[in-house]
Amino acid sequence: MIEIERKFLVKSDVFKNRATSKEKIAQGFLNTHPSRTVRVRINGNFGFLTVKGASNEAGTSRFEWEREISAEEAKELLKICEEGLIEKTRFKIPVGTHIFDVDEFHGANQGLIVAEIELQDENEPFEKPDWLDKEVTGDIKYYNSQLSKNPYSQWKN
């Protein structure tokens, strides 16, 4: 139940031509405390309830527990979530032996595109495609729970 992932900004939309799937996601947070978050997500016709613990010092790994719930249950739970719904399109892009999840955000986070790769080990090597930009692993402002409270559209350059 430990999730190991790295996050990167994306510098072009060339990844879209390599996507094997894309899906609309809506999610909210029942709790955004730094040591634990509780997320409700609707992904297509499915709902999910996810609990995440605090990240390690590098921001690469943390406890994650997730269970599928009905989309109807998820819709009801979204009604009582903290303010700040996250809306995004997720693209799945195979690169080498891994799959990148690339999230193109909408709404208050329009313009932000973040790629994530899940790994088996923090030091596992992986191929970096040319559309990846700066690594933002461990930068809390790019966590979805923080984007719900401090959206990208409100950041000052």
Image: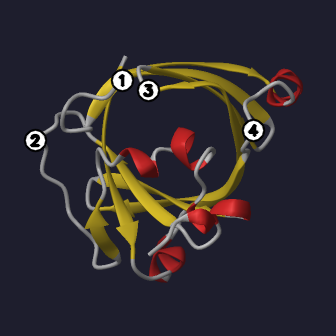
Residue 101 position, x and y percent, is: 46, 54
Residue 125 relative to residue 100: left or right: left
Q: Are the residues tagged 2 and 1 within 8 Å (C-beta)?
A: no
Q: Are the residues tagged 3 and 1 within 8 Å (C-beta)?
A: yes
Residue 84 position, x and y percent, is: 72, 44
Of the two numbered discs 4 and 3 on the same chain, state the one appearing first in sequence: 3
Residue 125 relative to residue 46: left or right: left
Amino acid type of disc 3? Pro
Q: Which residue is mark 4?
A: 83
Of the two numbered discs 1 and 4 on the same chain, state the one appearing first in sequence: 1
Q: In terms of image quadrants, where is residue 29?
A: top right
Of the two numbered discs 2 and 1 on the same chain, state the one appearing first in sequence: 1
Of the two numbered discs 4 and 2 on the same chain, state the one appearing first in sequence: 4
Spatial CA distance of label 2 from label 3 is: 25 Å
Residue 64 position, x and y percent, is: 43, 21
Q: Which residue is mark 2?
A: 123
2 or 1: mark nearer the eye:
1
Q: In terms of image quadrants, where is residue 151?
A: bottom right
Residue 43 relative to residue 73: left or right: left
Q: Which residue is mark 3?
A: 34
Q: Secondary structure at mark 2?
A: loop
Amino acid type of disc 1? Ala
Residue at image position (19%, 38%) is 58
107 over 84 or under it: above or below:
below
Spatial CA distance of label 1 from label 4 is: 21 Å
Q: Are the residues tagged 4 and 3 within 8 Å (C-beta)?
A: no
Disc assigned to residue 54: 1
Residue 86 position, x and y percent, is: 68, 48
Q: Are the residues tagged 1 and 4 within 8 Å (C-beta)?
A: no
Amino acid type of disc 2? Asn
